[in-house]
Amino acid sequence: AQSVTQLDSHVSVSEGTPVLLRCNYSSSYSPSLFWYVQHPNKGLQLLLKYTSAATLVKGINGFEAEFKKSETSFHLTKPSAHMSDAAEYFCVVREPGAQKLVFGQGTRLTINP
Amino acid sequence: KAGVTQTPRYLIKTRGQQVTLSCSPISGHRSVSWYQQTPGQGLQFLFEYFSETQRNKGNFPGRFSGRQFSNSRSEMNVSTLELGDSALYLCASSFPDQFSDGPYNEQFFGPGTRLTVL
C-alpha cells in the first residue's frame, strides 16, 4: 500500500528565509507524488507533481521539490518565504492506475514577520 | 473556466439524520472523487465515480454512498449521521484519462462542504 509521512506537523520560519517541508513515501511502484496547499477555509491547490519525468520538479509560487528514490523522500523547498505562504501543506501519493490520493497528515507553515 | 463547485458550503444536522452533498465538476471532467477531512484522521478518500460508475472506494461504512449523473455532477449521501461524521467534505474532479501520468490526471478540488453533526 502507498503511504506518505510528513516529518513535521508544524514549521515556523521568518519572512525571506528558506522553507523546507519534509516528506517520505512508501510505495511498491514508481510513485506519482504531489504537494498540495490548503489556505484557511479554502480547498486544496496543487503546488507541483512528480511523475517520473524529472527528479527536480518546479511548481507554482517559487516552490520546488526533489524526488530522491534512494532516500524515498520528496521534500518541498522554497528559497525565500513570503507571508502569503502561511498555510497547510500536504504531501500526497496516488495509487497506481487510480484516482485515489493518499494524503500525509499535513504540515502547518507559519511565517514570522 | 469555472472551477469545482460544492453545495451547500455549510450544513448543520443532528444525529440520526441523513444528508446529501452536491459537487459540480469542471466542464469536461468526467471523474469525481470525494474526500473527508477531519482534525483527527486527516484527509481520507471516500470514493471515485467515472461515467456514472463507482470505480474506487475507500474504507468507510456503507452509510456513506454516492452517485454520479450523466452530466458528471455527483452527490454523496450520509445516512444515520453520527457525531464523528462532522468534517469538511471535499470533492475533486479530473479529466477522464486515468491510466496516464500526463497532465490530465491532476485533480482539482472544490472549496468543500463543512458538515456539523450535533
Image: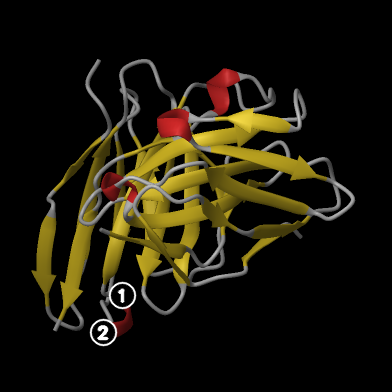
Give the chain letter at badge 2: B
Q: Position of residue A3 (x, y in %)?
A: 69, 61
**Disc 2 marks which amino acid?**
Leu
The answer to whether the residue labelled 2 contacts the one labelled 1, judged by CB atoms less than 8 Å apart, is yes
Q: Position of residue B25 (x, y in %)?
A: 31, 30
Q: Is residue A2 above or below residue A54?
A: below
Snapshot quadrant of residue B78: bottom left
Residue under pointer 2: B83
Give the chain letter at badge 1: B
**SS at circle 2:** helix
Q: Which disc is residue B52 wearing? A: none
Q: Is residue B20 above or below residue B73?
A: below
Quarter placement of the N terminus of chain A: bottom right
Q: Is residue B78 in sight in this rendering? A: no
Camera-side residue: A15 or A99? A15
Q: Residue at x 28, y 41 (%)?
A: B110
Q: Residue at x 56, y 54 (%)?
A: A20
On screen, residue A62 versus residue A102, left or right, reads left
Snapshot quadrant of residue A102: bottom right
Q: Residue at x 19, y 83 (%)?
A: B15
**Disc 1 marks which amino acid?**
Asp
Q: Position of residue B113 (x, y in %)?
A: 21, 55
| Farthest-out residue, right | A70
**SS at circle 1:** helix
Residue under pointer 1: B85
Q: Position of residue B7 (x, y in %)?
A: 15, 45
Camera-side residue: A108 or A99? A108
Neighbour tally class for label 1: few under 14, some 14-19, many 20 plus, Cα within 10 Å:
some
Q: Do the residues indicated by labels 2 and 1 lie within the same chain of the protein?
A: yes
